Amino acid sequence: MTAERFVGRDHELQQLRGLLDKAADGRAGTVVLGGEAGVGKSRLLAQFAARAEKDHGAHVLRGACIELGGGLIPYAPLVESLRMLVRERGEPEIRAAVSDTTWDDLAHLVSDFTGTAVVAAPDVAPSGSGQLRVFGAVLRMLEHLGQSAPVVLVFEDMHWADQSTLDLVSFLARRLSSERALLVCSHRSVLAPGHSLRVLLAEPDFIRHVHPVALPSFDERDLRKFIGELSPDPATPPDRDLARRCYELSGGNAYFAEQLVLSGALTDPNAHRVPESLNELMLARILTLSEPARRVMQVAAAAARRLDDRLLEAVCGLPDDVLDSALRECRSLGMLVLNPADESYAIQHALLSEAVYQQMGIGERRRLHTKMAEALTADVALGLTHGWSAAVELAHHWFHTDHRAEALATAVHAGEATMGVRAFYEAESQFGRVLDELWTKVPDPEASAGYSRQQLLADAAVASRWAGHVAQAVARVQKAIDAVSAQDDPCRLGELYERLGSYHWEAGAIVEGRAAYSEAVRLLEASAPDGAAHARALVGLAMAEINLGFYQAALDRSEQAVTLAETIGDAGAKGRALNAAGLALAMLGRGQEGEPRLRQAVALADQEDHLEDLLRAYGNLAVALELTGDLDGSVKAARDGLRRAHALGLAELRLAIVLANNAGASLMQLGRWDEAAEVLEQAMAGRPRVEQSAYLRLTVAEFDVARGQYDEAELLMAEVSDQRISDPRFVAALYTCEAELWCWKEQPSRALDAVHRGLGAVADTENVLVRLRLYSVGLRAAADRAARAAKEGAQTSDAAALGTELIAAAEQQAATSAENLEVQILLQLCQAEYHRVLGDDSVPMWDDVAKTWGEIGRPYPTAYARWRQAAAGLAAGDAEAAAAAMEEAVETAMRLGAEPLKTAAENLTVVSVTTPGRTKPPYGLTNREWQIYRLLAMESATNHEIAKALTIVETTVATHVHRIYPKLGVPNRAAAIKKAYQERLFEDPPGPAPTTD
């Protein structure tokens, strides 16, 4: 018997209902409900769920984690909740409610899938996106269901959660925003040090996204009400002394109090003493059971979850009438409960189940697990679980027996099954059991497993890789390599080396990855030249060579892979090869040839539904378009990829973060800094620094330097440097960023040191652009050093010699890519900086640099050149040129938020000179506004024509025009033109100066 009426918990229930109200209004949330074992968490959640359904018509999905060998059933609460949903509504209705695509990504969790061998499959996650595809589908499901009513998703007993469930909860907590959904997770408050849930609850960013609710024990008043509901006559209050004694013993713990009352321990005159701990009380209650009833409880405890009555009958081995009597005894005492939904039995509370299991001896447990395993093996229908989860449960029972061969075989099968549902942590654990605990204990392990050890090592490596344990993946596949003879099976050895290359790639060890891919290509060319593994190895080698700066070799490899993929009819391999070929062409300065290949790679990845390939192709397309100067196209490609990732709920995917980085970098170059900041901040948000992409942090560091946030930039660069990136594009960018930082901080010697370290690091690369960027900032630093020396009356010969060395190298490099526009602009910049080293730079020289940057829509380097132009004008005594250039530099820097550049330009002392007869523009207009007003009024120029004439972007013109109108006191363009003619503002000599109040 249990309490029928819900007692107390008003505050906690109100908290939950308030959060549900917010969720119903489109403000999703996550609740973490903690409390000691037996305090009443499940009872509170049941009450909340009932009220959610009644008051809001909410969709309530509930499931619980299972204590099964350390939480080895992956996604247990999700699977239970989905199966409940299928039972209640049927799959056709669910598909209609959440969309076919979403349900397709979840249906395998509730299907009869039992897993298939993965040893011969390519080392890619199922459907190409692994675990995050499941996560994204759950997020979309909540969004779709929430359109008709708010959704409450309850995961109970998270202290037993498997790693996949913990990752899902972490994902949902960070990603839920406008969905009409509330995720509620309960757990025991006492967690051992190092417990996975305890680690998650300690993450500041996770806690920031959740609402913690602590459920305390009953106070004495509420406990008295609670035990009153347990009496045969709830209308009669319990004896006050008995209630006080119950409170003193139980400490307000609801389950302990309930057991004290139901056992009669408080009122039994024959009891020698009342048990003073819950465990003691439960053991005492177990001992009062008849032998058959105790047997039933032991079988239920060994099952570790609900069990079918036929399985109970098979394992108990009791006559029907004895079993029926034992079941009635257990149920009448409230120790066993029947779930009417699936007619299964379960022990009334987890604490009681634990007590029963712990009371048994080791031999008793082993014999029970053996009977359970034998019964389920003989007839899988006896289990309540099906497919892959049944495989995991069976492996659990065999593992706790003396039958090592069966334990090994079922663990292999469970590993395959969990791989099939993308539960990679649990698959890794199953394969680890096989290889590390069972292999040496079985006489003929390969016969039991059905695979060789090297095949299982390769399987385990795949699981480790997708679980994020790349170092373990490398170690596993290296052992597999060591177990294969090149003479006996060169093809298999080549396949394993191809995998090793991919794992090194994942770990960022590009040099090691290139070596592994090279060996794979060598072996496969000789043994399986027309195989899919050969195509993958060629593409992997090509990508490694791209990352190391060997673009022509990469192009050759990837073109060979394209041909091979077409020969074998592998569309996925062809898409990956085209992706590599397109990027290699772009890096060689042949982006217009690379673009169609990359667009074809996007189409093929989309056709094959391989999300990782798709996002990678979008990212590389964005890079290629950036290199051809099509920054708007680059932003569009990156954002198209991001939209696809967001639509699937996969913004957390590493490649989605790369796409955000690509979009942010191109937006920065376009001068759309506010948009860039928003994209980059969204990509950085919700992740610990260690999880953020090194490339993303480097882009943000570049942004911070340009905005004058030097401390944060230095911290980010130090973190990036620690990751030992080998790609010359990013190595060069890191040193360029560092050098620019020191230039702005007026430490040219440190800037030059960074430049020299950068040039040394990319000495072998074929990438001309990265070298020229380093040369340009190096020449800037040399010029700064020369200017400082001249100001201090020191010799400038050292700076001049260094500048001569740098300009010679820059010109030599630029000659190899004469057709590349950005290369030629960078060379022009280098030459202007070199003349600044010599002290003979000029206004026309810097004006040419500014115009060329302006023509391709790069406002920040344009403003930098205008700053230098203003300084050259001052040095030459050309105040008018200096004034106009300085004003444009200041205006652009102010619009962008480039504080160091703005400050530097403002520090120039320039006399403002405008039209003949005027010392300054009227009406408080700036020089730039006056220039724009002249073109607008005297030539009736459009904003586009004004932007072209002044080599500035059109949005800047529009901003100035809207500032001009209020200063003139006119409402529009026509009135501004009329005013110019009426007051003869642009005539020579001008009309009389306007009067002001």
Image (cartoon, helix red, strand yellow):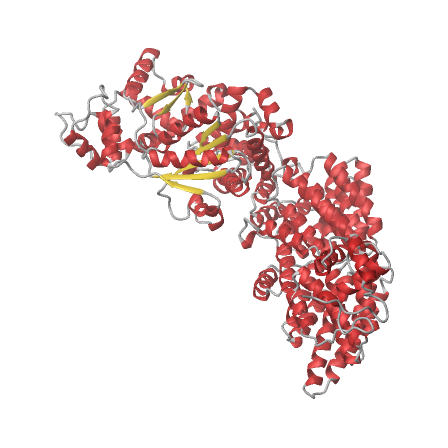
Q: Viewed as shown, does residue 551 lie left or right of 486? A: right
Looking at the image, which is closer to me, 322 or 885? 885
Q: Position of residue 630 (x, y in %)?
A: 79, 52
Count of numbered badges drawn on the protein: 0
Q: Is any part of residue 528 visible from this angle?
A: no
Q: Position of residue 853 (x, y in %)?
A: 79, 62
In the image, residue 663 above or below residue 27: below
Q: Is any part of residue 414 visible from this angle?
A: yes
Q: Position of residue 126 (x, y in %)?
A: 63, 35
Looking at the image, which is closer to me, 897 or 199? 897
Q: Position of residue 560 (x, y in %)?
A: 81, 46
Looking at the image, which is closer to me, 474 or 233? 233
Q: Viewed as shown, does residue 110 lie left or right of 325? A: right
In the image, residue 777 above or below residue 338: below
Q: Quadrant of residue 232?
A: top left
Query: Where does the N terminus fall, quadrant-wise?
Result: top left
In the image, residue 320 above or below residue 798: above
Q: Quadrant of residue 313?
A: top left
In the image, residue 571 above or below residue 912: above
Task: Tell me the residue at 44%/19% (across/down).
Answer: 341
Q: Viewed as shown, does residue 155 lie left or right of 616? A: left
Extreme top residue here? 321
Query: Where does the C terminus fall, quadrant-wise?
Result: bottom right
